[in-house]
Image (cartoon, grey):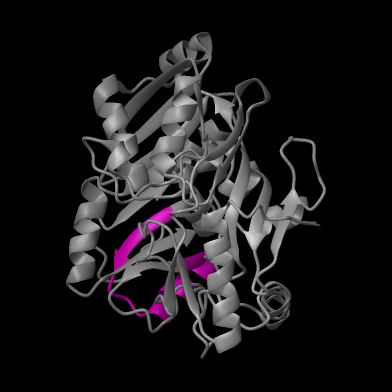
Amino acid sequence: MTTTTIPPTDTALLALIDRVQGARASKGKLNVRGGGSKAFYGEAEAGELLDTRALAGVSTYEPTELVVSARCGTSLATLEALLAEQGQCLPFEPPHFGSNVDGPLASAATVGGMVAAGLAGPSRAAVGSVRDYVLGVTILNGKAEVLSFGGQVMKNVAGYDVSRLLAGSLGTLGVILEVSLKVLPIAPATATLRFEMGQADALGALNRWGGQPLPIVASAWWDGNLLLRLSGAVAAVQAARIRLGGSVVDEASAASFWRGLRDQHDDYFVRARAAVADGATLWRLGLPQTATPLSLPGERPGDQLIEWGGAQRWLVSRQPAAALRAAAAALGGHATLFDSRDKSAGVFAPLTSPIARIHQGLKQSFDPDGIFNPGRLYSPKVHPGL
């Protein structure tokens, strides 16, 4: 960990520091937010808005080293466009949510929000999560101190775990000011295959294929159709197409589908959000890939969408939260209330006492006065101080 000296000309950063100092002095609370594309995710926002978008720009980019550093308010779409110019990408496919299907630059998502949310797209099971690509971070803690952890090279391990700790913290530990990320080259070949099969058959096939040397980087099953995305060397993708069979989806349609799945504006999520508006809940289930199909009373065809080789299962349901979480636990997993008009059951599954103490200790260390995003991860009724 290092303490960073702030140049007097860095007005955007100085403004953030001033806001934190003021909140600490007045015992106020701050709602840390970038573009607001993920405002629906997690518990309700609270506190005075602290907009991070003024602190923007790519600090350094070394294509030959596969490393980029960007400030928190940098548009995610702008960063991805810069990487694409060099034939590189963020392989974990962070969702934009607010992006327009006809123009991804319409996205409001920011780099800081990407790390704070810790959400990854269709390729997550094959390539890893956001935290796996975080090399270093600079944060503003609750004492108005600017601290740096980690570095800008892949083998740097100084403070590495602290850097990753920020991924998925939803701004509760501090303001992510800048992040250094590992990037990868865009694969030279890709193809999408479609298969007609039921849920049990799809899960069985995914488990069989998962144990074979196949370039499968994404999968999605919904309403009787399984789609696989192959990616890698040209020869490997061509050989897998022949070996697996199925029907080939044309390139434009496939790109639109996977982008829609990533940003949740495809047919499944359009229907899911309509159901949420009518009182249902959209659940995100994390299960072992080998878990059997989950069946609940009242479930209708099309209520489930399965990704990540069976490890991530989306479910639209009106079942009580306790029953659904128990069903997920019985299969060795957990359930997150991803979107609902009623979040009284808690967004995330309650922590065990030992884990809760660790969370509370971290919060005390980084934000002793509880300034940042109070209750964003857990309701104070469930876990006070988080």
Location of the C terminus by quadrant is: bottom right
Q: Is residue 176 visible?
A: yes
User: Is residue 342 on the magenta stretch?
Assistant: no
Residue 322 in the figure: left or right of residue 149: left
Determine the image quadrant of residue 165. bottom right
Residue 125 in the figure: left or right of residue 303: right
**Residue located at (73% from left, 79% from top):** 354
> In the rendered view, would you say 244 is above or below 112?
above
User: Is residue 315 on the magenta stretch?
Assistant: yes
Q: Can you give x and y, in whole percent of width and height, for residue 349 in the image?
A: 52, 74
Q: Can you give x and y, in whole percent of width and height, for residue 267 in the image?
A: 21, 47
Determine the image quadrant of residue 173. bottom right
> In the rendered view, would you say 222 is above or below 298?
above
Q: Residue furthest top?
A: 235
Q: Can you give x and y, in whole percent of width and height, for residue 328 in the image?
A: 48, 67
Q: Is residue 386 visible?
A: no
**Residue located at (32% from left, 45% from top):** 107
Q: Bounds of the magenta span?
A: 313-335
Q: Residue furthest front?
A: 8
Front one among 173 and 201: 173
Location of the N terminus by quadrant is: bottom right
Residue 380 in the figure: left or right of residue 163: left
Q: How many marks?
A: 0
Q: Can you give x and y, in whole percent of width and height, for residue 292 in the image?
A: 47, 55
Q: Residue furthest bottom?
A: 381
> In the rendered view, would you say 15 is above or below 202?
below
> In the rendered view, would you say 375 is above or below 169?
below
Front one among 197 and 37: 37
